[in-house]
Amino acid sequence: MKIQVRRKRAGIIYQPSVNKIDEDGNGIAELEDGRLIQVNPGTQPVLDATEDQAKVNMVQFLTDSHVTRKSHLGLFRRPDQDYGNGRFAFEVCHPEYSVGVIVQMPGAPLDKVRYMMIRGQNIWNFPRLYVNDLSLVWCHGLLRDSDFTDD
């Protein structure tokens, strides 16, 4: 199996390379023994997504985030950076830092997007959002002050 190294926020992760795409648009990797595994579930297009719902989701996302002075965050729609697959681009700015964060928020209903590792939630049923192009589920994508620095 080929291994690709991808940079993640808190270190290095290893991910098998995708060599097939299933009928839902999910990446599939074939292991040396012929078994297939799904890579990065939730990355397929978000159906029936709306920009208005993505805005609602962003407000909740910022509320859930681990950022000091949340009430001072700036939120700007960036349609020129949309992925075009049911995710809508927003830039989040913090007044104390010079670096903005781009979030590609799915425009599906909040209860279908907000994965918080709560009993009864199945991670396979939730679309990924992208924080500065990193594919993450909601609870792992929540912003922190360190996301707004160059470090």
Image (cartoon, rainbow, N blue to C red):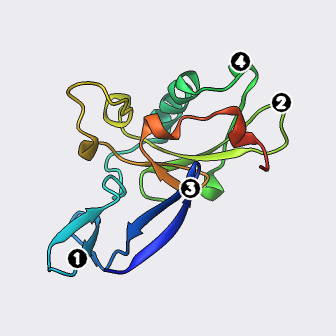
Horizontal side, residue 144 vs residue 32: left or right: right
**Mark 4 vs mark 3, CA separation in Å:** 25 Å
Badge 4 crowding class, 10 Å Cα cut-off, few under 14, some 14 to 19, many 20 or more, is: few
Whether residues under marks 1 and 4 lie with C-beta atoms below 8 angstroms apart, the answer is no
Tell me the distance, in whole angstroms, between the alpha carbons under discs 1 and 4.
Answer: 47 Å
4 or 3: mark nearer the eye? 4
Nearest-to-viewer mark from 2 and 1: 1
x and y percent of residue 119 in the render?
A: 23, 24
In the image, 73 versus 138, the foreground residue is 138
Q: From what the image shows, is residue 130 above or below residue 1?
A: above
Q: Mark 2 = which residue?
A: 95
Crowd rating for badge 1 (residues with CA inside 10 Å; few <14, some 14–19, many 20+): few
Q: Is residue 79 above or below residue 149?
A: below
CA separation, marks 3 and 1? 33 Å
Residue 131 position within the rendered picture, expressed as x and y whole percent measured from the top left: 57, 48
Q: Is residue 26 above or below residue 48?
A: below
Amino acid type assigned to the residue bearing label 3 in the image: Asp
Q: Are marks 2 and 1 in contact (CB under 8 Å)?
A: no
Going from the N terminus, do you reach mark 4 or mark 3 first? 4
Residue 67, position as x, y percentages in the image:
66, 26
Q: Earlier in the sequence, mark 2 or mark 3?
A: 3
For marks 4 and 2 on the same chain, the one whose residue lies earlier in the sequence: 4
Amino acid, disc 4: Ser
Please tell me the numbered disc located at residue 65: none
Helix, strand or loop at disc 3? loop
- Distance from the alpha carbon under mark 2 to that under mark 3: 24 Å
- In this figure, which residue is indicated by the disc labeled 4? 71
Residue 62 screen position, x and y as percent? 58, 27
Residue carrying label 3: 82
